[in-house]
């Protein structure tokens, strides 16, 4: 029941299983895992695909000959394991050149270099078969609003995305771009901090149909928001092009815990939403193992992400088939006779009928909705008491 299959499309980033356990207060606790070995580990853990930043695979200062060798060996590992590369992205945050942003930097030379680096990374992603390209603007922000006009920053970001959309089309890559929001860290404030902000921004682009979102569980949770609602909005807009699954204790730094490690209830409703909606894209785990783990623990982490998703997917099926839960939902959502006035599109006659309809406000206010019982059934289901 909990064995991954290709149709689940479980993916991990190279940066996730290759995370060496370094943090701002401590050095690495495990050795770097080379890309080829990361691919093999993920295949053993049951993954379908592997995603990457450009420099996860090819060092930033590699020569053309070195890049060719690295890519050749990586492709051989993909062929050996059967893993695919569905998504690629660019590291525009690690190098000191991007200390004040990439596409929004005040330095025009930095903005030009960011475009160059991204085009080359798009070339690499296309060579490996990627069809989705994610943009996370980790340095696109400020510590002080004295340093940058936010309107100018948005204009610069818009111009960069318009340019790169045109580049993708000109090269025939067929990419769908997915924008990833985060409120802060590593900058004090990052522009377009939520999925909703990204959706609003997309409408201002030259080719909005090419661009969607890549919401991340931890990022919305850092802002104190409900991630399930952010994903639902993206689905409703037809813009859920990719998704980052992990876990987060709200109000903390970006923890990137194993999926399902902390928020059982919200993780359940997220999985239920994706499964009920028929989401067909990759289920990408952007997380990393605890700093306490060795290489074996990293494999346990990867397997745990997959297993947690599959367990919650089974719980979602149980929810949908549970007679008591479904009867309660039917009762909660039972239409009243007055509800007939809401059926259909606007018409003058319907508006007049609605204005003339008498409503018993006291009855409406006194009706119990059964939400306590329903919520307890969620707990019972998740705890295995049903």
Image (cartoon, helix red, strand yellow):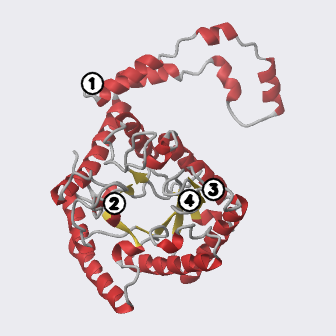
Distance CA(mark 2)–CA(mark 1): 31 Å
> Nearer the N terminus, badge 3 or badge 4?
3
Which of pointers 3 and 4 indicates the residue nearer the eye? 3
Quarter of the picture containing the N terminus is top left
Position in image of residue 198 (x %, y %): 60, 55
Which residue is farthest left? 296
Q: Which residue is mark 1?
A: 386
Identify the residue at image location x=57%, y=49%.
194
> Nearer the N terminus, badge 2 or badge 3?
2
Position in image of residue 21 (x %, y %): 28, 58
Instruction: Please state if 108 lies on the left or on the right of 14 as rendered.
Output: right
Res. 212 mark: 4
Identify the residue at image location x=26%, y=82%.
73
Quadrant of the image occupied by residue 352: top right
Neighbours of disc 2 within 10 Å: few (<14), some (14-19), many (20+): many
Distance CA(mark 4)–CA(mark 1): 38 Å
Identify the residue at image location x=59%, y=56%.
143
The reply to whether the C-beta atoms of the residues labelled 4 and 1 are less than 8 Å apart is no
Neighbours of disc 3 within 10 Å: few (<14), some (14-19), many (20+): few
Residue closer to the observer: 66 or 346: 66
Q: Which residue is mark 2?
A: 11
Quadrant of the image occupied by residue 26: bottom left
**346 is higher (above) or lower (below) than 134:** above
């Amino acid at each position: 029941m909990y064995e991954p299959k290709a149709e689940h499309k479980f993916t991990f980033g190279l940066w996730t299983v290759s995370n060496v356990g370094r943090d701002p207060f401590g050095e690495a606790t495990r050795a770097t895992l080379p890309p080829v070995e990361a691919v093999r580990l993920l295949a053993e853990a049951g993954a379908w695909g592997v995603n990457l930043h450009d420099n996860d695979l090819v060092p930033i200062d590699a020569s053309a000959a070195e890049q060719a060798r690295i890519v050749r060996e990586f492709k051989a590992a993909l062929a050996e394991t059967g893993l695919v590369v569905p998504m690629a992205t660019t590291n525009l945050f690690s190098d000191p050149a991007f200390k004040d942003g990439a596409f929004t930097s005040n330095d025009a030379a930095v903005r030009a270099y960011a475009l160059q680096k991204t085009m080359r990374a798009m070339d690499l992603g296309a060579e490996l078969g990627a069809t989705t390209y994610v943009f996370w603007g980790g340095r696109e922000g400020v510590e002080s609003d004295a340093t940058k006009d936010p309107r100018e920053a948005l204009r610069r970001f818009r111009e960069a995305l318009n340019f790169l959309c045109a580049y993708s089309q000109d090269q025939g890559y067929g990419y769908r771009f997915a924008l990833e929001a985060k409120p802060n860290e590593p900058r004090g404030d990052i522009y377009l901090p939520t999925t909703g902000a990204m959706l609003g921004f997309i409408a201002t682009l030259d080719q909005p149909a090419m661009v969607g979102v890549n919401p991340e569980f931890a990022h919305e949770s850092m802002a104190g928001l409900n991630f399930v609602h952010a994903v639902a909005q993206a689905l409703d807009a037809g813009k859920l092009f990719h998704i980052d699954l992990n876990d987060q204790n709200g109000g903390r730094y970006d923890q990137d815990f194993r999926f399902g490690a902390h928020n059982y209830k919200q993780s359940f409703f997220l999985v239920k939403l994706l499964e009920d909606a028929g989401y067909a894209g990759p289920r990408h785990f952007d997380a990393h193992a605890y700093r306490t783990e060795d290489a074996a623990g990293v494999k346990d982490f990867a397997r745990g992400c997959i297993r947690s998703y599959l367990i919650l997917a089974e719980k979602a099926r149980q929810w949908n088939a549970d007679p008591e839960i479904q009867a309660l939902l039917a009762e909660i959502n039972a239409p009243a006779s007055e509800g007939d006035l809401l059926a259909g599109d606007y018409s003058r006659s319907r508006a007049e009928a609605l204005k003339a309809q008498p409503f018993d406000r006291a009855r409406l206010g006194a009706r119990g909705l059964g939400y306590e019982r329903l919520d307890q059934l969620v707990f019972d289901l998740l705890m295995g008491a049903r």
